[in-house]
Image (cartoon, grey):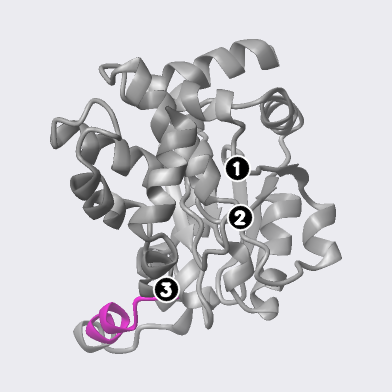
Amino acid sequence: MSFRELQASLAQTGYVADDALAMALHLALALGRPLLIEGPAGVGKTEIAKALAAVKGARLIRLQCYEGLDAAAAIYEWNYQRQLLAIRAAEGMGEDALFTEKYLLKRPLLEAITQAEAPVLLIDEIDRADEEFEAYLLEILSDFQVTVPEFGTITATCRPMVVLTANGTRDLSDALRRRCLYAHVSYPSPEAELAILGLRAPGLEARLARQIVSVVQALRHEELEKKPGIAEMLDWAAALSGLGINDLSDDPAAVQASLVCLLKTAGDRDAVPPELLARLIGRAA
């Protein structure tokens, strides 16, 4: 599949990828390398892995990163309860019999490398995890294998397609970056966002779609704590459609109330009073 064919296939799933991102995905697949995708929150980084899994007809295995994430939650741990039951049931059981695959609990990373068919492994928001956790990833991202001290080395039967996302909350290590191809995703251009809206909400009036994109694009240039992302834009479009609004100037009060879909903090709600929204709608008309 060429990168143009991949780009077209992603569009069929509802994901609009620009040339740079489509090429990065294509090369990551061709070279069997993980792809690190950075960008602000809300630009659709997680959706890339979901769309790729849909295109490939592959299982999506997701590891959501967070502060304090460790190997027991991400890679594997032993089923101690089952081991204790086995010891009680069989006196004289040797230690070697306890540390077998039968008692191994597979977490997302180990699960991903033991599939019969290559899955898509999404390591989401890697920058939320501690720096120490990155060291656990290096063996997997380099050799697609996991070493279990009591058991041995487990090597991937099929290499997963790996996508890592990061929001830029902290710097990632050079060692991690060296193991990945790289792509940066920003907020979409007005044309791209209109195309996304057209794919996800094909029944929306063309005039309303243009107004929605114009207002959302303008709001991202305001001093907001949480700028509205693509998902918020789609939620707002669905809400307006459900309210029966075909033009943002038809019912100012309802449109103002519907901003709960876009603005997610009290400060941001205060920062967009009716007067400002009216000006933005006026420019979009």
Q: Which residue is mark 3?
A: 267
The Cα–Cα distance between marks 3 and 2, rounded to whole angstroms, is 20 Å
**Residue type at tag 2:** Pro
Do callouts 3 and 2 mark residues in contact (Cβ within 8 Å)?
Answer: no
Instruction: Give the residue at x 34% y 88%.
Output: 92
**Residue type at tag 3:** Gly
The Cα–Cα distance between marks 1 and 3, rounded to whole angstroms, is 22 Å
Using the image, determine if residue 96 lies above or below residue 249: below
Using the image, determine if residue 275 lies above or below residue 73: above
Q: x, y (%) of residue 23?
A: 73, 25
Using the image, determine if residue 49 lies above or below residue 285: below
Mark seen at residue 40: 2
The Cα–Cα distance between marks 1 and 2, rounded to whole angstroms, is 8 Å
Mark seen at residue 109: none
How busy is the neighbourhood of tag 1: few (under 14 within 10 Å), some, or many (20 plus)?
some
Q: x, y (%) of residue 194?
A: 48, 24
SS for dot 1: loop
**Which of pointers 1 and 3 indicates the residue nearer the eye?**
3
Magenta-tinted stretch: 76-86
**Which of pointers 3 and 2 indicates the residue nearer the eye?**
3
Query: Which of disc 3 and disc 1 is earlier in sequence?
Result: 1
SS for dot 3: helix
| Foreground residue among 155 and 74 | 74
| Foreground residue among 153 and 87 | 153
Mainly helix, strand or loop, the magenta region? helix
Query: Which of disc 2 and disc 1 is earlier in sequence?
Result: 2
Instruction: Give the residue at x 69% y 17%.
Output: 3
